[in-house]
Amino acid sequence: MSQTDTQLPPGHGWLSCRAVARLQSVGTKLRFLLAAPVVVALFLLVDRGPMWPGVVLALAGESLQLWATAHLRKNVQVIRSGPYAWLRNPMYLGRFFVGLGLALLTWRWYLILPYVVVYCFYAQARVLGEERHLSGLFGADYEQYCQTVRRWLPLPPRRRLSSERWSWDSVLRNHELRVAGGLLLMLALLKWRIEFWRPG
């Protein structure tokens, strides 16, 4: 759900909730450094197939993340507004489509399929840990929310769950405009690479 940034309960094995949480913490701190090799790899690999399917998926994923961050109140309350009325983990779903869109720009299935598998394992492990934390933090209120809204499959709510509205303060606090700007800049660079730059 991404409603929390706190420590998660321990798990077992290399894909435990704690291990996944540590990996995400490191990835968040080094996100700009880690983005550099991704941009370079995409710059070198986007040389086949149409660009628009990947762009559509990436922008759809970022739009979902932007919508989610506009309603996000971490560790303050159980969020039921915006996309959180449709599914419990819109941020993770949005990130999945951003990554899938970028991978699809390469039109290389040996990159796309491993991404899908690895992300699904990662997101499930991460979300299970977050749900245990939120259940302990909000108790019956969060458990009732889980009974109403599905974890991954978006479904229209049968009734209005919250009166909360879009908040630009929340978007700015969660730095999502910076992420959206970075994605647009990356897509523009890749478009220029396809149209005007030829190796050799």
Image (cartoon, rainbow, N blue to C red):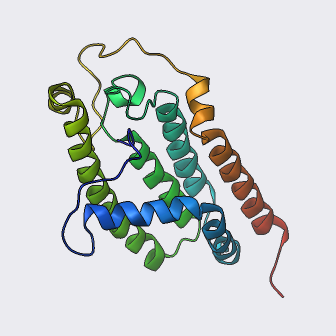
Q: Is residue 120 above or below residue 85?
A: below
Q: Residue at x 32, y 26 (%)?
A: 85
Say which quarter of the image contains residue 46.
bottom right
User: Residue placed farthest to the bottom in the image?
Assistant: 200
Image-based side of 89 in relation to 150, left or right: right
Residue 12 x/y as whole percent? 18, 69
The answer to whether residue 133 is left or right of residue 166 is left
Instruction: Say which of 82 and 23 sits in front.
Output: 23
Residue at the image point whose x is 60% and y is 69% from the top: 34
The residue lying at 44 percent from left, 29 percent from top is: 73
Examine the rendered structure and indicate whether residue 189 appears above or below residue 86.
below
- Number of numbered discs visible in the structure rendering: 0
Residue 139: horizontal and vertical position, in percent? 17, 31
Which quadrant would the N terminus be assigned to in this image?
top left
Q: Quadrant of the C terminus?
A: bottom right
- Residue 35 position within the rendered picture, expressed as x and y whole percent measured from the top left: 63, 66
Identify which residue, 88 or 76, lies in the foreground: 76
> Quick check: 192 left or right of 48?
right
Whether residue 144 is situated above or below residue 116 in the rendered picture: above
**Residue at the image point whose x is 77% and y is 61% from the top:** 189
Horizontal side of 177 relative to 72 (left or right) equals right
Residue 87 position, x and y percent, is 30, 35
